[in-house]
Image (cartoon, coloured by chain):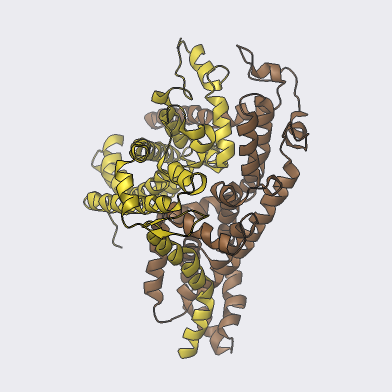
Chain colours: A yellow, B brown
Amino acid sequence: MKSEARIAYLFAMPWILGFLTFLLYPVMASFFYSFTDFSVLRPPRFIGLENYKEMVQDEVFWMTIRNTFTYVVAAVPLSATVAIILAMLLNTKVKGLAFYRTLFYVPSLVPMVALGILWLWIFNGEHGLLNMSLEKLGMSKPPNWLGDPAWSKVTLVLIAMWGSGNAMVIYLAGLQDIPQSLYEAADLDGARLVAKTRHVTLPMLSPVILFNVIMGMIGALQVFAVPYVMFPNGAPARSTYFFTTYLFDNAFRFQRMGYASAMGWVLFLITLTLTFVALRLSERQVHYDRS
Amino acid sequence: MKQKKFSLATVHIVLIVLSLIFVSPLLWMVTTAIKPIEETMTATPTLLPSKFLWDNFPKAVTYGSKELGYIPFLLYARNTLMVTLLCVAGSVCSNAVVAYAFARLRWPGRDFFFAVTLATMMVPFPVLMVPTFGLFKWLGWVGSFRPLWVPAFFGSAFSIFLLRQFFRTIPMELSEAAKIDGCSEVRIFTDVLLPLAKPALAVVALFTFMGTWNDFMGPMIYLSDQETFTLSLGLQAYQSQHGGTQWNLLMAAATVVILPVIIVFFFAQKMFIQGIATSGLKG
């Protein structure tokens, strides 16, 4: 028994070291840095709550919060909806499932930078595929997707929806786990598609939905690469300047690593709070199969 | 019965329309990549190019003059591949070993530490960014590839979780039988468990490959010398200097960056789908 424990610690050693070096240390250090004035050139100087006080009055900070929340509130539910609808369509025993699944999944494989560049071209106002198609369909003045602050976030949300193939695969696996007998029972009760979706499919899928929506939310709160590539400096009119972009700029462009650390901790707290709220709100809606 | 046939036909039509929407951006990218430049700028662009300029691919990704700033694709591909392969190797080795300790061995503090490990998945990367950068700066590693691959050798919570779940499905009796035969823990791990865990290890390798190949923020933080850029970073640099002018070449460059990922996916499709499904269902 004692020797088993000794061997076990040896086996676990890479992660024990990794956890201490790449998680515990950075988390604690950034907590400390958040109370300091710190750049690469100067050692950290303790300034108490100054960074947090400044944040409260920093208009750019609040703007990035608004931008990020708007994006999360739109992108997370919409891409979850697309993913669930695609999964339900594929779960109808339709022929060619693997083929369709591949087509829907491939977009989520595209590396972020290539993705951003690709969409710059599709959304291009003059020669882009999208506006060309819209004009063909009779829209005389299609939106200025990239240049109009009212549309830039819509653009990013549409891109997020295009990448819902990854979640679709998960939902599809969840749907395939639902016992067929439940649908047969619903059939006997004369339930139609809408009723079956509401009373069988969604409740049975709810734990998977909850988990994926929370993961999607955590990811969307950190949205960075695609807007960074597509909208330099948060253009147009800073409508795409997001929390993580501002944090990154503070850390590596403005050399304000203390302030960036404080922002990191705020992001951490927002993430924890939203996750907690999601778990609480869903307590009654989520159905856990206790078998 | 008739109604069922009708609705299946509807599903087919909806699926065909949707898949066209999903695929058309990628098709448009490829057709743009082989168009002559004039045809990307006309008022009424055509779906297919008048002539197929396959030349655009080598043009977009070979060493041009410094002013033109074409992407030195082979150099960046080599950089990316090196970092990616190191990460895959590190991730498979370290996570297998660690997950084994969590799944098959008893030691004080195991369950608590495992819960902590899972909780770390909630920590946003931006929180860790500044101190990690400071650490690598202190080590003198900024500007080298080491900050990008060394951490892979120390495990990651997600892969540990994935592999642990897999190891636990293997009956304990197998290990006990091997023990009676006089196998040490190390031998049980290398000779009994590892061969059985190949599919799960492949999933970890695959996810690591994708994650590293696609990583943008890491290289952007640590690499500043153009010679050391990865493909993502090189593509971004090219776009920010020449974006919006030569769309055909830009699309050609994007295509060759995407291509390896798609190829890997087609070879390992089944593994992918299963891996993603388990990672999202057992949470």
Q: Left or right? Give the position of A19 relative to B81.
A: left
> In this picture, is B171 found above or below B156?
below
Tell me: residue B144, above or below residue B57.
Answer: below
Question: B205 and A43: which one is in front?
Answer: A43
The foreground one among A177 and B89 is B89
Q: Could you tell me residue B61's position as x and y percent?
A: 73, 36
Q: Name the foreground residue: A211 vs A289.
A: A211
Quarter where residue A240 is shown? top left
Q: Can residue A249 be seen in this view?
A: yes
Instruction: Please name the residue shown 28% across and 49% down the image.
Output: A278
Do we see residue A168 in this rendering? Answer: no
Is residue B271 depicted above or below A7 in this figure? above
Tell whether A160 sits left or right of B234. Answer: left
Q: Residue furthest left?
A: A284
Q: Which residue is located at x 47 percent, y 37 percent?
A: A94
Please state which of residues B168 and A262 is positioned toward the viewer in this rendering.
A262
Residue pictured at 50% horizontal, 32% vertical:
A231
Q: Tell me the quarter of the picture where residue B258 sits.
A: top right
- Can you give x and y, in whole percent of width and height, for residue B147 in the image? 59, 59
Q: In what quadrant of the picture does the N terminus of chain B appear?
A: top left
From the viewer's perspective, tell me whether residue A286 is left or right of residue B227: left
- In the image, is B48 to the left or to the right of A109? right
Tell me where residue B204 appears, x and y as whole percent. 56, 59
At 47% from the left and 29% from the top, the residue drawn is A235
Q: Quadrant location of the C terminus of chain B?
A: bottom left
